[in-house]
Amino acid sequence: MNELRKLLDKKARPAIGVFNGISALLCQKLGFEILYLSGAAFSGSMALPDLGIITLTEVKRLVEEIRMVSNLPIIVDVDTGYGEAINVYRTVKELEAAGANAIQIEDQVMPKKCGHLEDKQLVNVEEMIKKIKMALHARKGDDFLIIARTDARTVEGIDSAIERAKLYLEAGADVIFPEALESLDEFKKFAKEVKAPLIANMTEFGKTPYLTLEEFRSAGYDIVLFPVTLLRASLFAMKEVLREIKDKGTQKDFLSKMMTRKEFYELIGYERYIELDKKVANSSFNMK
């Protein structure tokens, strides 16, 4: 399994938000290096809002599903940790055992909100630090990373986000994630002040302008999240083909925008399963 820590090299590597096994497998086949189990994408795939109402059990199951088809590092968005600090202990234990490589925990109160919405509320610094320390105590080794996200920029301003980040880093967080910064200058200022591995969020329709990976790289960021891009693009494509069927009674004019049967079978390794079945069926067993 790849070690996520080795990829923290200020190269602004993209981490794609996945929400099931097939989206994770597609990312791996196309050469991406990091998977991001996005809480927003996962809850959205269940037709639920991103308010922290998905459960640890559901997220653990998805980590296991992804790990069955991909050996890429998985960063798991655990929202606020599924409860109080003591719950974070179990969260880390369960997800590390399931095959995750890192958790990302944020400093919002419940019900938490998308980081690019208004009216968020923050927990006090002491509570967030307690959660970070609990996560550190729970993990088996340093290869499992604890990512501390601060939502302070929207609530209290960039200087507060920087000060919180420094305290989270001092508490032992491995990586810092400043959410919803509003300009390239802010990303640069944050990176200059916070000497740590850094994650940026390049979500759509949010407070952050559309910056390129090269711009994030120049600002000093290690990983750039695209958390809901695949889900949004998938939903748009489904909506368009559904309209096509409803309006024309056929999907035939939409075929050029679909993955072919052959491409899909190659993606999931269909023939490998068939060959394995034949091999087992034709093998002789010594029944004792």
Image (tube, helix red, strand yellow):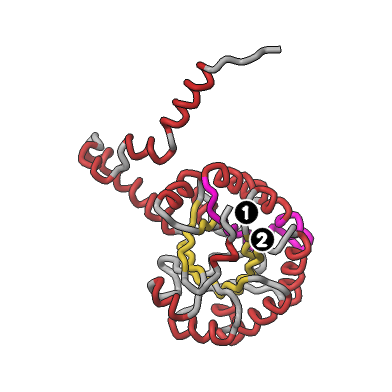
Residues in magenta, as a range:
70-92
Q: Which mark is residue 142?
A: none
Identify the residue at the far top of this view: 288
State which quarter of the image contains the C terminus: top right
Crowd rating for badge 2 (residues with CA inside 10 Å; few <14, some 14–19, many 20+): many
Q: Does 29 sit left or right of 120 as displayed?
A: left
Q: Position of residue 103 (x, y in %)?
A: 63, 61
Q: CA distance from mark 2 to mark 1?
A: 8 Å
Residue in the image at 43% along x and 36% along y: 269
Residue 117 visible in image: no
Frontmost residue, 239 versus 6? 6
Q: Position of residue 192 (x, y in %)?
A: 54, 86
Frontmost residue, 135 versus 263? 263
Frontmost residue, 116 versus 14? 14
Q: Is residue 86 magenta?
A: yes
Residue in the image at 43% along x and 38% along y: 268
Q: Is residue 41 magenta?
A: no
Under circle 1, the secondary element is loop
Quarter-of-image position of residue 111: bottom right
Residue in the image at 23% along x and 40% along y: 247
Q: Amino acid at mark 2?
A: Phe
Mark closer to the chain start, 2 or 1? 1
Under circle 2, the secondary element is loop
Q: Position of residue 246 (x, y in %)?
A: 27, 39
Q: Which residue has dot 1 on it?
A: 100
Question: Do labels 2 and 1 touch, CB within 8 Å?
Answer: yes
Q: Which residue has dot 2 on it?
A: 144
Q: Does 179 sit left or right of 130 as displayed?
A: left
